[in-house]
Amino acid sequence: MSTPTRHGQNAGISSPHTPQRGISSTYSSPGFRTDDDTVIFELGTRYLRAGLVHDSVPRCSLDFGPEQSRRLGDYRKWLPGFEDRPRVVKNLETWTKDHELWQLDVRDTDLGLMLDKLERTIRKAYSEYLLLDAKSRKIVLVVQAMISHTILSRILNLMFVNFQVSSVTLLPPPTMAVVAAGQRSGLVVDIGWHETVVTAVYELREIAELRSTRAMQLLSKEVAKFLEGYIQSKNIDGQLSIKTKLDFEYVEELMTQIFWCRPASQVLSSHDRPIEAEDTNVLIPLPLPSSKGVEIPFSALSGAVESTLLAPSDDSRKQDDHECDLGHLIYRTLLSLAPDVRSMCMPRIVFTGGGSNIQGLKPRLLKELEAIIRERSWNKVWQPVKRTASVATTPRPSTHIDAGDTHTKENPTNAQTGAAFEDQIYDPYEEKIYKVTAQFTKSEIRGEIRGIETMGVFTGASITAALRIKSLVEIERELFLQHGLFGPKREQDSATSRPKSLTGVYTKHSALDTSAWTLGAFA
Amino acid sequence: MDGEGVAAAPWILECQYCNWTSLDIGITFDKPNNIHGQLAKILGKARSKVSLLLDKLSDEPEPTEPVKAFRADPDSRFATLLSFYKSELAKENPNDNPFASISGANTDYSSPSSFARIMSLYTNTNNYGRKASGKSTPMRGAVDASEGLVLVNHLADEKAIDILHRTGLSQTINTEQRIAQPHNPRFQNEMIPQATLLCTKRSRRCRTCRHILVKPEAKINNTRYKIKLLALNHIPSMTLKPLTSLPSTLSHLPPNKPLQFLLTLRNPMFEAIKVSLGTPAQTPGPRAHSVTILCPDFTLGANADVWDEALGIGLSNSNQNKRGSKLLLKDLNNTEESKVAEAGKVWERGRNWTTVVVEVVACQSLKGPPPPLPRGGPPLSFGASLEGLLEAEDREVTEDDDVLEIPLFVRLEYEQAVTEGGSTGLAVGNVATTTAAGATTSATSADGISAAGGGEGEGGRDGDIGKRTRELAYWAVLGVGRVANPSAKMPEQK
C-alpha cells in the first residue's frame, strides 16, 4: 500500500497554491444544468442498468437475452401459444451464452454482435426510460476493471461515435458498492454471473482482490442438473423422455425465486427448528404444457446453492485457486491484508451481485467466515489436520472473535511457541492515538465480523456523481477519437504506481496535465 | 381505475384481469389524475416518516424501524447517505480541502468571500499558523442508521425463507417483475405500482454526417413530420415471389430441389439506375442453401411523376411499354410452362421496375463444423465428411434454423443532377427492406445499411458539372420462407 494521496496533500496544503477550477454553480447560466446532465450506466454481463444522477435506484434494468435481439417486425412474442412453444434445448455448457453480453474468453465473442446488442439496449434506455438525447452528455460508466481492453475500447468507441457523448467516466464497481453502503472501507463480495470477486477496499481504494468461478453461472448449471435429475427420477406420467433437458429461462426463473440457502442457525443446532421436521413439498411447474408440475421437498432446494457456492472440496490442496469456495475466498482475501486494514474490513463486509439475493446466503457466509477464522486464526501457514471447516461440524462458542494479529489474546491450543503466538505488548502510544481520535469522531467498529447492506453499485455511482467527485479515469471525446484507449501518451509509470483510487485525481500532476488521462485501475 | 361514486374521494387502481387492487397494498388516491405524482407523494410520506424516526433515534437507539423504512423506500436511504457524505466532506478541513468545491456554495472560487479567504492565506500569519497546527479529522464511514447504515439482518433472511417455505412459488415474483421493480422486492406484497412509460417522438440523425433524417412535429396531437427523409424513397424496393405456384406453402419449402423466385426491383427515383446484385453462392448460417441470381446486372427505368403520366406527357413511350408488359403478362398466363428462365436474361421489365429470376436450392441438413486442419498427410475425405455428419447430428437446433434467407449485396449506379451547394446527401439510415414472399415469412430488415455497404462513391467529380455519377452499395436480406423438415417434428403438429 502506498501513501494515501489525500493525506499527503493535506500535509502540504498550507502552502499557497493555485486552486483548481471548480464548476461554479452560482454563476453559471440558469439553462446550463451540469449536474442533471450526467447519465449513469452500470454494465454487467447480464444486465445494463441506467439512470440519472440523484436517482436512488436505476430507472431501468435491461437484459441482453435472446428476446431482445428479435428482428424489427418480429412479433411472434405476442402471438398466442408463444409461451407453450417447444423450447430450444441447448447444451448445458453453452446454454447461457445467449443471455450474456460477453464471455470471459473474448476469442469466441462476436464483437460486432455484442456492440449491436449493447447499442440497441442503450438506445432503448435513452428513448424509453431516460427520455433524453444522448448527445454531448457526460456519462458515468461503472464496469468491471478487469474487463478486456478490446471490449472496453469498443464500448467507449460506441459511446463517443454513436451516442456522441462528451466524456465517459469509468468507476470500479467494488468501490461504488462500498460508497453505497455508507463506508470508506470494506470487503466487497460480488457474487456475479461469471465470477465471484472479493475485493478489499480501504479508504476507497481497491487493495486486494481474489476471484472464484463459483458464481451464478455455475449455480444455474447445477440447479439445472439437480432439477433434471429430480424430474427424471419421478418421471411423471412417463411424459419426459430419458434425456430430460430444461431451458435456461425456466431454470433461472426457479433459481431466483425458490432456491435458498440454509442459514447457519439451521445447520448448526438441531433443536432450533430444523426445516426437515416440518418439510413441505413445493409444487414446481414443469415446462410442459399439459403437466401439472412436480412436487419437490423444500429442504432439497437449498442443496444446489450450498454445494455450488459454499461447500469446500474434500481436500483444499486439490482445489484450484479459481474454484475456491466463497467462505474461504473471503477468508483468504482478508488474510492477505495488513492487520490494520483487515480490522477495518472485517466489520464491513458488503454483499452485492445477483447471488446476494439468494435468501439466507449472506448470514450463512458470515457464519462460515467466523467458523474459518475460529479454526485457523490469522495464520498464513496452516496445516490441514482434518477438514472440518464447514459450519455444520464446528462448535460455535459465542465468544467475541479477535480482530487479528494485533489483538490476539489467547494462545493456540497446540503448544507451539513463537513470536506469532506471544501476547501483544502493551503500547501506550497506540492507546493514546485511539483515545484522541475517539474524541473527534464517532468510533468505528473494528475487528469483528459484520455484514453491511449496500444499496448497490449503481447507487454508489449516483452518490459519487451527485457529490461531483471526479474519478481518476475520465475520458474526453476528442482525445479518445484522436488517440484511442491509452491516451496521447501512455503514462506507464503513473498509471500503475498510483493507487487505484477515486481521490487520486487530485494529485497535482493530473490537475495540470489535462490533455492526458490514465486508465488507472482499468489499465 | 374505479371510483366509489361519481366524484368521491378515495380512488384505487384495479386490474380487470387479475382483480388486483391497490387496496391490497393500502394505497388509495385522492384524484383520478396524476397518479404518478400522487404515488410519489405517498412514498414521500414514508420518507418523512423516516426522517422523523431518525430524529427520534438520536435519543433512543431503536434501529429496526428506519431500516424497515429504508427497505421500502430506497430514496430515503439515498438521501440519508448523501447528506451524510456531504456533511463529512464539509467537516474535513473545510477551508482548504480539495473536496470543498463539492460541499457547498461558499467555497465557490469565483465568489468574493473565497477570494478574501485565499488572500488571507498570504496575509494573516496567525491564521496561517493556526491552521497548520489544526488537525483535520479523517473522514469516516456511517456508524448508525441515522447516517444510512443498514446491517445484514439474519432474522429478515430467516423470515423470508419461512415465507418461501410456507407459500412456495405463490408469493414470489418472477424475473420480469423483479426487473421492472427498481427497489428490488422479494415478494409480491412488496411490489409497488409502476408508472406507464411515456411514448416519445424522436428525431433521427445520420450516424456519420449527423444530418437530421426524421424530425416529427413538436405538437403532441400532430402526427406529421417536419423532416422525413426515408431511404425507401432513394433505393429500389424489392419484392420476391415464387415463379410457379409451389406445391406447399412458403413455410414448407421442399428441400434439395431447385426453386425459382421472381425478384422485382422498383425504382422510386427519377433517374435510371444501373443495378448489380451479388449474393454468396451458399448462404451463411446453419444451413448452406445455394442461391443463383440468373441475371445479376440490369437497369431500372426512371420513375415518372404520376401527374405527368396522367396528363400524357411522354405518353407514347411509357404507354407502349405498359401495353407491352400487359401483353407479356397475358402471354405469360397462357403459356406459363413455355417460358423458361434463362441465365443472363431479364425475366420481365416495366417502366420503372425489372424482374429477374433467382434460383434457390434449399438445404435440409445442418452445416457441419469447419473441416479440421489437416494433420500430417491429406485427410481422408470420407472420414472427414462422416465426422462432420456426426457432429452435425449433435449440434443444437435453434429456433429459426429453418428460415431461408438470402443475403444480397446491391450496388446502384446512377447519374444525378448536381444541386447548388452539393448537398446531395442521401438518407440511407435505417432501411427496412421487407420482402413479402409469403404471408408467413418473417419480416427482415437490413439494419444499418450505410454502415454495411460501401457508402457512396462519387465518381466523375471533375467531369461535367451538370451531372454526376453516384454510386450506392449496401447489403440487404431477402426472406424467402421456411424449409420443410420431414425428420424433425413440426411446431404445428403438437
Image (cartoon, coloured by chain):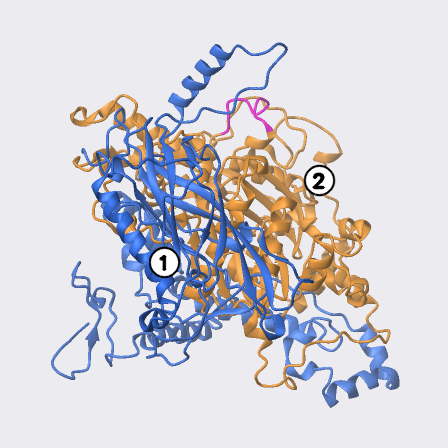
Chain colours: A orange, B blue
Q: Residue A322 lies in what quarter of the image?
A: top right
Q: Reply above or below: A225 against B381.
A: below
- To which residue does mark 2 refer? A423
- Between B326 and A172, the one lying in front of the other is B326
- To which residue does mark 1 refer? B180
Task: Tell which tag, 1 or 2, sits nearer the viewer.
Answer: 1
- Between A416 and A37, the one lying in front of the other is A37
Q: B237 left or right of B458?
A: left
Residue A226, horizontal then vertical, whole percent: 34, 29
- Chain identity of mark 1: B
Q: A457 left or right of A63?
A: right
Q: Are marks 1 and 2 on the same chain?
A: no
- In the image, what residue occupies the spot 67% across and 81% down? A24
- Secondary structure, mark 2, is loop
Residue A376, horizontal then vertical, whole percent: 60, 33
Q: Is B487 included in the stretch rendered in magenta?
A: no
Q: Which amino acid lies under the numbered mark 1 shown in the image of this protein?
A: Ala
Q: Please provide the residue range marked out in magenta.
A: A312-320
Q: Residue B375 lies in what quarter of the image?
A: top right
